[in-house]
Image (spheres, rainbow, N blue to C red):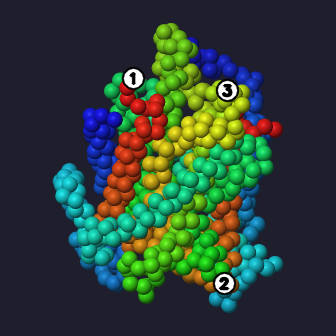
Amino acid sequence: MSPKHVLKKFGIFILFVWAALSLTFILVHLMPGDPAYVLATMYMQQWNIKFEEAYKMAQESLAWDPTKPIWVRYVEYFANLLKGDLGESIVYRESINKIVAKSIPWTIFIGSISLFLAYMIGIYLGSHAAWKRGKASDTSIFSLGIVLSSFPSFVMAVFILIFLGVKFKLIPLGGAYSEWIDPGFTPEFIGSVLYHAIGPVIALSAENIAIYILGMRNSAVSVIQEDFVNFAVMRGLKNKTISRKYVRRPAILPLITNLAASVGFLFGGATLAETIFRYPGIGYQFGTALGMRDYPLIVGLFTVQILAVLIAMFFIELIYPLVDPRARER
Amino acid sequence: MEVSMGKSRDKGGVEKKLKKVYTTYIRPLLMNKKSLLGLIILTGFFIMGIFGPLIVPLNMESDISKRFLPPSKEHILGTDYFGIDIFAQIVHGTWSVLVLAFLPSIFAILMAVSIGITAGYLKGIFGRVVNGIIDVFMTVPSFPAMLLMAAIFKNVSMVFAAFLMSIWMWAGPAKMIRARVYSIRSMEFVEAAELLEMPKSHIIFKEITPHLMPYIFMQFVNMIKYSVGASQGLMFLGLLKFNPCHWGAMLNIAVTQTGSIYLPFAIHYPLSIIFFIVLMLIGCTLLSYGVEEIFNPKLRTYE
């Protein structure tokens, strides 16, 4: 991989960041909906004040002034972003950078564990099912995939909260660690953090496991019908060797490019699952910000999510040629 | 000349066409076990959504004395926090669940087809620009984007909510349709049509689109599944409020507003909502996987 190649990919990455953020900016600011109006009606109900008063307050607390021309707001948004400043939250009266800094480690923690688990379990079960196509183990793995993929992460979250949390008391009902333990590098704290992560991780992995089972099965089934696999069978190679080296490896490739999409998918699921488990990650903050109509915080967190997806895409594109010799530059 | 040909088609032609549609699209769906089961489940929900409200009366008046009654003869699935029959609410919410599943998918597939074909068929800078737009839309995480859009509006109507959802659903399918068009475009029969100087509309609609139909159909079914899940999530966070009986809204009331998941005697309430959500999604998944098997015979199991 030449530096020139990396630089080119980086240029494309920057271009995409700009385009995706501009797109959301335009949609948020040009849509006929009036955030100040929505916010004002909320203030009105909350504090029992007149609408005009509430509307004025709402306008002041919004990060942007609707009377300014849109291109001025656009330039301001990107200027602040370049300085690394996401603005200030209305509700918490705190810099959004700080909120992101304290919540993103939690999401990365449970997100990476569940993505890793989903990827491993999904690929293993999917390729196994493809190899045993039509037999009992295929049918059962396939049915598992169908059922799991029908549990959106928030439904799964509610489901396991009811059973594992309330009924059998196996997992805690919410939070990221027990409040009476001081955060620090103590075994109790780490144990508590892991214990509290079980619920959110299961909720986030379930649908992804299903996606990878079904995706891997599809992809491996097509590979099995290729000539080189038939040839390997004719050469009398062991089944194990064929399924591992001849089928699994090429079948994984399309799923690797899928990983970036999984990151975006994870954020969507995290918004609901973290809200249900009151797990203080990005998704939880996003959920509460949406509930309280804290527009600067909503836009700030959304910006972070877009950046995360694009960074994931950038790295996967860099790594991909290492895995797939066909994608290497000659 | 073409117009007159179209007009001269008699009734027999229409019948023939219908028969062709039946043999190529509908019969395989009924022959495949997975898609048949999926279709049965979804048809069941349609019947429930259309005729259910006529049979099962809904009384939304709260009656605290009947709070959290367990399932019984009178209340098949028991009652909720306000003492309202759960099954009746679910039946009355079915229609809005179905509309929020199909309407966004219809909007999104129309966008995906038109934009995908444009990006794949047009050569030069314009085609590349359209392709770039698709790529940008694909990078934006769709569900958070829907949440963001829904938060800007107050009291969105059902149709508008469907439109908001579809904005974030068309890009992926459009990309796949584009790739198909791109490969079909260089095939001989399209080149022949181009050499004969057939009008562009003829090439796009009569030569290319018929080969896309299986893909379009597959994407459409996947979209339905996606929008069932996404609309439940939007309703669950309370960002759309037009029907308190929509299952996502019911789950919101059950989980966040009345905390009935923490009460051991009340878990029939969230569980019965979850059951219906998951059943509908299983129907969608089976249909989508069955359709995929039909159009991609490599995937079929030996029977």
Q: Residue A278, position in %: x, y?
A: 47, 75
Q: Residue B19, position in %: x, y?
A: 76, 29
Return the residue nearer the eye: B176 or A185: A185
Circles 1 and 2 in contact, beta carbons < 8 Å: no
Q: Which residue matches tag 1?
A: B123
- The N terminus of chain A appears in which quarter of the rendering? top left
**Given the image, on which type of amino acid does mark 3 rest?**
Phe
Q: Is residue A200 above or below residue A256?
A: below
Q: Residues within 10 Å of mark 2 (few under 14, many from 20)?
A: few
Q: Residue at x 66, y 30 (%)?
A: A232
Q: Which residue matches tag 3?
A: A231
**Given the image, on which type of amino acid does mark 2 rest?**
Pro
Q: Residue at x 56, y 36 (%)?
A: A250
Q: Which residue matches tag 2?
A: B264
Looking at the rendered structure, the secondary structure element under dot 3 is: helix
Question: Marks 1 and 3, Cα distance to the nearest angstrom?
Answer: 41 Å
Q: Is residue A36 visible?
A: no
| Label disc, if present, on residue B47 of the rendered structure | none
Question: Does A254 sit left or right of A61 as displayed?
Answer: right
Q: Residue at x 49, y 61 (%)?
A: A113
Q: Chain of mark 3?
A: A
- The mark closer to the camera, 1 or 3, is 3
Question: Marks 3 and 2, Cα distance to the nearest angstrom?
Answer: 59 Å
- The mark closer to the camera, 1 or 2, is 2
Looking at the rendered structure, the secondary structure element under dot 2 is: helix
